[in-house]
Image (cartoon, coloured by chain):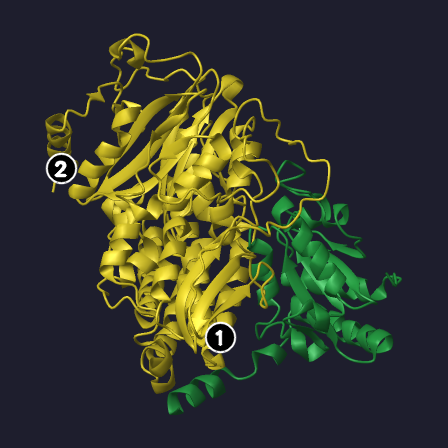
Amino acid sequence: MIRILKQSLGIGVITEAAPGIEDEELERLGVEVLRHVHARLGRSLSIRQVDAGSCNGCELEIHALSNPYYDLERFGLHFVASPRHADALLITGPVSRHMETALRRTWQATPVPKIIIAAGTCACDGGEFGVSYASCGAVENVIPVDVKIPGCPPAPLDLLRGLLAALAAPRKLS
Amino acid sequence: MNRFDWLSEFLARLEDEHLLAHSGNARLLAPAHRLVLDAEDWGNVAKVAASLGMRHAGVWADCGADHQPADSEDDGQPVGRRHQNEPAGSRPPSSIAVYACLEKEGDYVVLEARVPLERPKLPSQTPRFPGLDRLERHCHDLTGVVFTGHPDTRRWTRHQAWPADVFPLRADFPAAGHVTCQIPADADYPFTTIHGSGVYEIPVGPVHAGIIEPGHFRFHAMGEEVLRLEERLGYVHKGIEKIAVGRDPAGLARLAGRVSGDSTVAYAWAACQAMERAAGCAVPPRALWLRAIMAERERIANHLGDLGAICNDVAFTFALIQCGRLRERWQRRSRELFGHRLMMDAVIPGGVAGDLTPAAPRTLGDDQAALRKAVLPLFDIIDDHPSLDDRLVTTGRLSATDARSLGCTGYVGKASGLPFDVRRDCPYPPYDTLEVKPSAESDGDVAARVRVRMTEVLGSLDLLDVLLATLPEGAVTAPVPTAASGAVGLGLVDGWRGEILTFVRFGTDGRVARYFPRDPSWFTWPALERLILGNIVPDFPVCNKSVNGSYSGQDL
């Protein structure tokens, strides 16, 4: 236990470490996200991530949002385990044909109003995989998309920017 | 020890069994030794290979319609075209080439046989090598090759996106397919069931509760104990092998870097290595060193992420936060010095995409020293913490017998007493000049896999120090000559998950005609089904994370 305390106390709170340009941007973006979240939902935004066929690169960067540098939850954004708990779906990958029905069902299970975010170049336009016998390509070929976050994969800050855009976009009450 | 010490014995045993190995060009798929066989001997050769204790490294087929054997000069000596050595009439104009790769003591053989396109049958090798089960089913689903005597005739990679009687990798199958409607869920896949009083089923997936890739797990449990786990993968099948066809080398490297994003460097390297061997391209030493630096950085980043996640799965969030912090810093440096947080598209045919700045080696050296200093106390805690020991020791144990029979490599094999590592046992440059220390674990449980990963982080840091200190000067790319039509190459690279095998055949105009990447997860996914037995359902996440198979790399 002493070793753990020593390590934790020794490192301190890196989330608030002296900001470089990138960190300033992070704070600014995060606060803005929070403002929008409150304005629109009056509570935190619950995100259900769905990998519809990605190479897993996007998942690594989405995971990184939760590391102590970005600490996503302080902005009121958090990942939930079920689409039924979600306000937003964060979808990665070209939609593989084998995931097409699963994605539609996940979308149907998400309560209205819902924000659909396509994260990563593949989700935005099919990327390196495009449309084929095995891939439907972009997410919007399968379900309506509100916001696109390009990048292969999008870096955590790009993801945060995209979430901001999602909240700022006119909502489709689909 | 000399290379291929066992090959003469293997060939003698084949001869004893009257299994004809045609000569052909043995060096065509160097460093592997190529053996051309009659299709009917396919199963019996596997029997001999298994009796010699060889490890099976995968099977694949190539339906190239006009594929002529590309036997050509080797070592400057003209070699007779292979088909002249074979009985006349055994080769119909249209055939499928089936390949299998096996390894022993760091030396590889590639078996090759031809089956006619209209009757593509040959004996299954799965009865001798159970790890091959899904690879043969994948091969059947995509090429139509029938492996007779296979113990499981169910579909694997195919769900409902194409019918059972057409095969996407055949030349007459358009890459766009024939899809006209929404693809239904593969709802009637015949899972094996267990009946009995108190036995219940838990279906999980394909959409999982966490931020992970999709796949389906079917548990049978009694009380808390798992009686059976059956995996159903193929959900992220993206037709990678099909859409690779017709790409130029740079395009294939880009695609290879997206077979499994967490292994982007290793995959791109394996694909480039195969293409460079096929085309006869000598990669400059500095580029090889830079590739190795990136590959070791990739290994460290992934192990750090997984170590944190494994601990988090047993509620030890301290390690998740600490490892996440170190990983993030590491990735930021990758972006700064290699242009990308995961170093995607940094490995290109003929070399690497960019050189380091003059100041970069010093920065990297400082980073490595800082990371070593940071992980030592952290690993100390992870290695010796009572609440972690309670959950990880004896959990999810994979016996050495199971690991060996399935052909596990990487940390899964190493934790179960199989120290094989391509970097040490079949070293490709620059690893032929480096010392990769063998792993000494054998317990096979989650704790052992954690220890292997910690040892690998430190081992990679040592390698990085040497790589930086010996980084050669010079160019970082070489022009890649246009490969001859029919030229083939084999790539063998140790990714952070284990051995990545890649086969490439070129068609006309230097375009890729066949690309097959084999992820180490093909063999560790079945290992997960075995190591979970007798464990409790709530320990599945930590067992799964300790293995961390790639869905994307397996589904292709």
Label 2 element class? loop
- Image location of residue A139, percent across then percent down: 72, 50
Label 1 element class? helix
Q: How many numbered discs, if any? A: 2
Q: Colour of chain B?
A: yellow
- Chain that is coloured green in the picture: A
Residue B277 seen in render: no
Residue B246 seen in render: yes
**What crowding class fits label 2: few (fewer than 14 Cα within 10 Å), some (14-19), or many (20 or more)?**
few
Give the residue displayed 44% in from the left and 89% down from the top: A5
Give the residue displayed 35% in from the left and 22% down from the top: B114
Looking at the rendered structure, the kind of residue marked 2 is Trp
Q: On the image, which quarter does residue B57 sit in?
A: top left
| Mark pair 2, 1: CA separation | 45 Å
Asked whether, in this view, residue B88 is left or right of residue B189, the answer is left
The vertical placement of B58 against A53, above or below, is above
Asked whether, in this view, residue A87 is left or right of residue B228, the answer is right
The chain carrying label 2 is B
Q: On the image, which quarter does residue B537 sit in?
A: bottom left
Looking at the rendered structure, the kind of residue marked 1 is Leu
The chain carrying label 1 is B
Q: Earlier in the sequence, mark 2 or mark 1?
A: 2
Give the residue displayed 27% in from the left and 22% down from the top: B38
- Image location of residue A168, percent across then percent down: 85, 65
Residue labelled with disc 1: B320
- Image location of residue A65, percent across then percent down: 62, 68
A21 and B245: which is toward the camera: B245
Residue labelled with disc 2: B6
The vertical placement of A14 against B491, above or below, is below
**What crowding class fits label 1: few (fewer than 14 Cα within 10 Å), some (14-19), or many (20 or more)?**
many
Mark number for residue B108?
none
